[in-house]
Image (cartoon, rainbow, N blue to C red):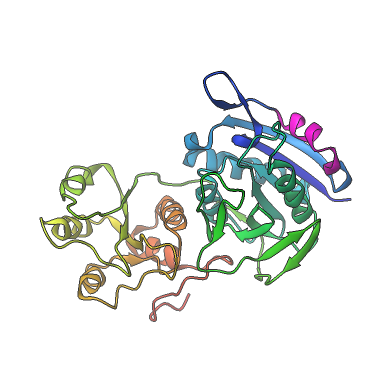
Amino acid sequence: MKHICLIATGGTIVSKDSGSGLEPELTPQDLLDCVPELQEIAQISVRDLYHLDSTNINQEHWLGMANCIQKEYDAFDGFVIVHGTDTMAYTAAALSYLIQNSKKPIVLTGSQKSVYQRDTDARRNLLDAFYFAADARSHGVYIIFDGKAILGTHARKMRTHSYNAFSSINCPEAAILLDGRIVRYFEPEISGDVYFYNKMNARVLCVRPYPGISPEILKRTMDCYDGLVIECFGTSGIPAYGGFDTAIKEWAEAGRIIVATTQVPHEGSDMSVYQVGKKLIDLGILEAFDMTPEAALAKLMWALGLEQGREGIEKAFYKRVWMDTFRKPENENN
């Protein structure tokens, strides 16, 4: 029987009504008591790391989770992290970059309703997460939710209430789970030893342009940030009126690392299509291609944390970890 570490960070799945709204109050043992069938799947040890609504999760908590897994890595066959759904996609992406080449599964799950409620998705998601984590063919970082196994760098929360909260963006689901049976569609290969990173740079601004946006948001904040993620219109469009494009140019000329992604959930960006996008190429802006905005943000924070200068950061951003499937520029050979 596999030995799995259950890491609790909070979220709806462990929440109770405090009288002023749901708060994450339950312990990992409470979860195990609510789903006793888990003990039939694996030997389980618990680590009570955080009690947070996931809206309060940030890069320090991502580093804390990675550090916890690093300390316990040799002692366990896999890890299940219970986490709130609102920022789960960000955490899954961040852990995919902080923990690379993991031959052991690192599974995130949660629920749309508390495990204490009668009509809840919590029990199924927990059972599926442990089935997946205890399977010998599982490795790397995944979100397990509503019977789907989604790569950590391609998950996005698409629904606020429904049980099928997450979708796999620009990448097929890796597997589905049917009453404990795992049907795999593909298995990305990994090579080399597991490697843990222990630093991220959170000085990254994410801006979503909208019709009528003022460049002041960029002009007034440049000194506060080392990187910028722009969620462009369509394939890569940014406004050219009001000096917004000029403000982006000023960021680039000041040495800030800029990544262009898209507001459109599916099919990714392509700066080479339109004149408004080709301007970004000329400025040396990096492109996320079919990465989600969550993954682009997390990867830029990770790349900036390496402190390797512009060339090193760009190389790191375009470096494929085994779960990245985005298209690389033609001149990239790493």
Residue 126, percent across and down? 73, 45
Residue 57, percent across and down? 50, 37
Q: Which residues are magenta?
A: 27-38
Residue 67, percent across and down? 61, 42
In the figure, 29 relative to 99: above or below?
above
Q: Residue at the location (72% across, 34% down)?
A: 118
Secondary structure mostly seen in the magenta stretch = helix
Q: Residue at the location (65% across, 46% down)?
A: 109
Outermost residue to the left: 242
Instruction: Please check the rendered image and state whether residue 36 is part of the magenta-colored stretch, yes or no.
Output: yes
In the rendered view, does 112 fall on the left or right side of 45? left
Residue 157, percent across and down? 51, 51
Residue 244 shows in the view: yes
Tally the numbered discs: 0
Q: Nearer the viewer, residue 235 or 200?
A: 235
Q: Residue at the location (41% across, 53% down)?
A: 297
Residue 242 found in image quarter: bottom left
